[in-house]
Image: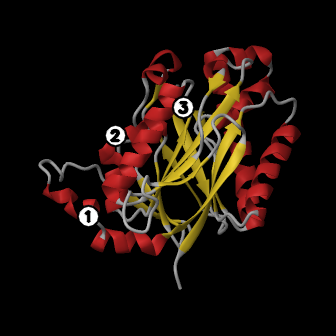
Amino acid sequence: MTRTLKIAAAQYPLDELSSQAEYTDKITRWVEEAAAAGSQLLVFPEYGAMELASLAGKDAAADLQGAIDAVSDRLPLQAELHQRLAVEHGVTIVAASGPQRHGDGTATNVARIFAPSARQGEYHKLMMTPWEREPWQVSAGPGDGLCVFDLGHVKVGLVICYDIEFPLLSRALAEAGAEVILAPSNTETEHGYWRVRTACMARALESQVYTVHSPTVGAAPWCPPVEMNVGAAGVYAASDTGFPAGGVIALGELNRPQWVYAEVDLDLLEQVRGSGGVQTYNHWGEQPGAALLPSARKVLLV
């Protein structure tokens, strides 16, 4: 029997929330919709958690460091909700990332993955954009933070936005067994969107994996750090035998809130790696400097 995976990638709008209950209702509706469509893996975007800042009031949401603190304080509530929904619907959910404040005062950009087994994992972004460095003052995660999450029927790697533009990170995940690499993003211009999209397509080509892009979309003027969000969700593969010629499996409508769905054939990856028109996964090690890869840990979530 062919191994397949039904993916839902969110084009997710940030709302100014009036209560925790409103947030719970919103996330519940989104998860219920994707689960009803048969999705097994649901991916929310980078900094989608910033809408939680509105629960601390307008002044906190409008202040950069105040918004970071407000979101960080509410990440445990986010985790509890997503874990409950993952178990209830029998799906794996990558929750929208958000800034987490640590005891030493630093903050990192963390995304958490929740399995129907009630196990969970997390990834802290490694490559920080100029605006995350200043003025956000969000720091890179630990250097050993790359993980491949074993969901039983599929192994997935997780990077965040700018990370996908640096090939060695995704290659390390592929060599550690990732068949699908997830790239939630937050970009304020079409230039940024296209950088992430192009990188997703390049990583799919290089390692003959599926890549999944999930962006925030729309305006959020009440929170200046994320006041404008541009993007379209997509699922990409290598341009090779059995896949669409352009490598695009699914693509959303720019800036419209929606789920973008794709069912991917996992066995086809193995076939193409061994007998495709090109074999970039197998031939990677022949290029100069190919051995200079970071390490990636394996995390069991079943």
Viewer-nearest of discs 1 and 2: 1
Q: Is residue 133 left or right of residue 83?
A: left
Q: Is residue 222 left or right of residue 144?
A: right
Q: In this view, does 32 lie above or below 191?
A: below
Residue at left 79%, top 17%?
Answer: 58
Viewer-nearest of discs 1 and 3: 1
Q: In this view, does 45 lie above or below 62?
A: below
Residue at left 65%, top 36%?
Answer: 48
Which mark is drawn over residue 57?
A: none
Q: Given the image, on which type of amino acid does mark 3 rest?
A: Gly
Element under label 2? loop
List x then y, in percent, for residue 210. 46, 58
Q: Residues within 10 Å of mark 1 (few under 14, many from 20)?
A: some
List x then y, in percent, for residue 35. 74, 62
Quarter of the rendering occupied by the C terminus: bottom right
Q: Given the image, on which type of amino acid does mark 2 rest?
A: Phe
Q: Is residue 120 left or right of residue 269?
A: right
Residue at left 49%, top 47%?
Answer: 123
Q: Name the residue under label 3.
A: 103
List x then y, in percent, for residue 249. 53, 57
- From mark 1 to mark 3, how far is it between C-alphas? 46 Å
Residue at left 31%, top 61%?
Answer: 175
Q: Name the residue under label 2.
A: 166
